[in-house]
Amino acid sequence: MSAVFVWIDQFKGKALNASWEALAVGRTVANAWGVPLTAVVFGQGIENVVTLSFHYGADKVVKCEDATLADYRLEPYAALLGKVVGDAKAVIGGGSTRGRELIAAVSADLNGALLSDVTELSADGGKLNATRPVFAGKVLSTVAPSGDGSVFITTRSRAFAPLTPDASRAGEVESVAPVLSEGQISTKIEGFEETKGTVNLSDAAIIISGGRGVGSPEGFAPVRELADVLGGAVGASRAAVDAGWIPYPHQVGQTGKVVSPNLYVAAGLSGSIQHQAGMRTSKVIVAINKDPDAPIFKLAQYGIVGDLFKELPAIAAVFREKLGK
Amino acid sequence: MNIVVFTKSTPDTAAKVEVDGGGKVTWGNAQLVLNPWDEYSVTESVLLKDAHKVNTTAFAIGDEIHNDALKQALAIGMDNAIRIWDAGMSGQDSLGFAKSAAAAVKKLGDVGLVIFGKEFVDVGTDAQVYQLARLLGCTAIGAVSKIVAVDFNAKTIKVERMVEEGKQTLTAPLPAVISVLKDINEPKSPSFIGIRKASKAVIPVWSSADLGLGEAASGAAAKVSTVAYRNLPVRAGQVEIIEGGSERERAEKLVNKLLEEKVI
Amino acid sequence: MDFLLTEEHLMAQKMVRDFAQKEVYPTIKEWDRKQQMNPDVLPRMGELGILGISIPTRYGGQGYDYVTLGLACEELERVDTTLRVVMSVHMGLNSLALLQWGTEAQKQKFLAPQARGEKYAGFGLTEPEVGSDVVNMRSTAKRHGDTYVLNGEKMWISLATKAHHFLVVAKTDPAAGHKGMTAFIVTNDMKGVTTGDLHGKLGVRAGSTGWIAMQDVEVPLENRLGEEGEGFYVAMSCLDNGRYTVAAGATGLIRACLEDSLKYSMSRKTFGKEIARHQLIQQKIGFMQQWYDAARLLYLKAGFMKNRGMRNTRETGMAKWYATDHSVQAALEAIQIHGAYGFSDEYDVERYLRNGKGAVIYEGTSEIHQLMQAEYALGFRQDRPLRCEMPAYDPSWQEG
């Protein structure tokens, strides 16, 4: 019986957290089916990622270290992943930009069933049933593969918890050769500009967001201050982004990022239905708003009716004291 | 040379979408709009048409409600709109969508670029973007924030795309399938002249027979089936409003609660 | 009988709605507080074609019918009255008057750039001491050969400092009563024309209202709209169109009150239930819905008559009187439903009241309209044919 494969997304030798989340899902499926769990790692300088893949639950690792794979490109990655997984029963990827496109592409190459952006998965009795948010996260759907063919799964970022790493775990590492040579790859990477700061919202455990109430670009200062104290990311509502106070990569909501942190602080943000679509799966939501009737209070666990410019600095100060920062 | 956009009608972004007693997804009397991300793909196609003298076609796969999106695409300035549908396609999965889309692109012919919005918000996925590219055997580039250069004669494209770690610049040959983000342009409004044209347009429908698809893209052949829809779980409990005489007092109460619950 | 709007109507309505909601609404409170007009509004309305919506394409417009003009005004005032005021003066009181009374040369020279949104247009009838009793106006125009020399002051002029072209009425024969008035196209670059803004208004604070002073302004004969002595008729036909935009706009204001009240009453709770469950709130909402439906039928009927080229002075007047009166009523009720929040500018309803109050004063006070309707009913008032009738809507407006 063939294995369950999980593709490990890494950037410059560091795996994305989403990959460990996917590996945990893979473990559940592999256990239910009684088959081994194989992690697949492509790139250069990936030794550490290979080692960690075992720690996070893989039984076996298939790797390919090659210059053509140094930076992710869909063409060579899809060609190779398709060959590695062959007629695997399940192929899983984490909810990253690369994971979502690679798994979808290979599902088409191999004519398999694709369950994308999954937030819950059960493999009870060996049968897969997945939950996917639809209609901008306003409704959930339960989906299942119809036949016996290969199943491809991508997970929604932060929807699943990674396994606790076990440093004693190790296993067989199989090295494979790339399928495409550089001459056969038509996509070329011409440049890369790394994003600085605390923008990476989809992976953040803590997000402090500002809305129309911040009033200006400078108004984000107390939002940033609290994010800095807590090591969190800065989010924003569409209103704040459209007003030009903060760039688009910070936008949370239906036409921005969908996030699921442990703590989401919404400051001066009314909580439109579009915004809620992007953050309602956050574990704890704290709302700070002058208007006690703002819809965000309906979603929040804790609320403060007050002026964000007074409340946020006070909260930052208390955290600083308590956390000894 | 043709530029193609795949679009669809989705409930207004402010609509309250729910599952009714019969298990059906409903959005009350909220109006249907162009899938919000498609404002950018449609606009980009019109900008490219103006700059490169190419022909633009909007496709939608689905029943009559998707004529709204196609008409909106025409009103914004796209040249043609075609709907793809027959009853057998109902229940299609993303791969079925991609198979229908690939057949439509081939039937149209001479397609240089296929542009999608970031995702279709109703089905909540962008899988069809990459599945279509693979079926067509062409390049897929997702999350494009800028088309730096495109040459429809030399058949090359250079784009910037956003990944988790930052912004990548890529070159690839055409034809290509791309998905675009909000950064790419300022969405164009429909024009009155476009509205006139759109409101008079009769939108042709291509069936799976017209596309020579057989059963391949039918609902019956779908590899994934939707078992049920359900409403979001109600978030437990009511909001606890933190009271206090000063912001300091409120902040202390809040921080203690968050630390107690090990949220931090 | 056919109450259905066409697909073209609905798509145009949605386009105007999207503009107002997405581009104007997000910052409207700030501009209202600042008592300034958002400088992006007029250029954007021009760019989108809204400023030429119901002008034939051969005169630079979009060639849509009068019903579309009404629908656009409803959507604009749904967001803010100041947007509709632009349509009232630029389109209703000025551009449509040029279409009705202008020579071909005047249409090409003045109407076309207005319809294309390159020039903005205003209307100067009211004076500091003359409102409803236009016959007593003091502005004068003295003819010297092929030139008229205008003197006088016009007040409460929308877009006074923004418009390039004004339609101004002045006395050419002070002894001849309403037959001694003549209409002129005055441009803001003419020597002797000065303009200024008025502040401290109760409402339409995000708009532009001001005054025009004319001192020995030389206006060439070719700028005279209509014949000498026809100014009163020109002005009254302007009002048939201006009032139509006001009626449709006020209908949008009633809708704003209704929609905001629906939303608030379903979210705000008192005594353990949504306030919408209380019957006295439902009574207010029932009335607002009634007012909206009635106001909408009245303006659409007037628009239908305009499309057919039927004289509609009475019907348009009725639509204006009903819609504006009830928009003030609706705003008062909306504020009451919103309670203390309605009294604060955190919510929009207080602005609706301030904005609505102007329209029961301008373009015929409610009192004047009430008397007019009584006079029509009693047979004391009849409309006589004009030398130049408002053109019926014609599909050829879309050609050329």
Image (spheres, rainbow, N blue to C red):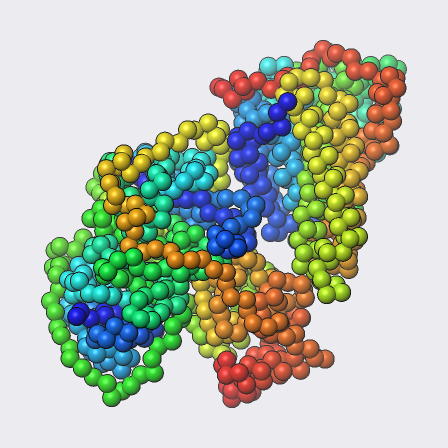
Question: Is B39 located above or below residue A40 in the figure?
Answer: above
Residue toward you, A230 or C377: C377
In the rendered structure, the answer to whether residue A159 lies left or right of residue C80 reads: left
Question: Is C24 located above or below residue C271 in the figure?
Answer: above
Residue pictured at 15% horizontal, 77% vertical: A173
Residue pictured at 49% horizontal, 32% vertical: B195
Question: Number of callouts in the render?
Answer: 0
Would residue C119 be visible to someone looking at this image?
no
Image quadrant in which you'd find residue A154: bottom left
Residue toward you, C273 or B68: C273
Residue A240 point in image, percent of width and height: 54, 59
Image quadrant in which you'd find residue B203: top left
In the rendered structure, the answer to whether residue B108 lies left or right of residue C50 reads: left
Image quadrant in which you'd find residue B113: top left
Residue A86 point in image, percent of width and height: 16, 63
Question: Is A22 located above or below residue B211 in the figure?
Answer: below
Residue toward you, C124 or C50: C50
Quadrant of image for the N terminus of chain C:
top right
Residue B33 point in image, percent of width and height: 49, 44
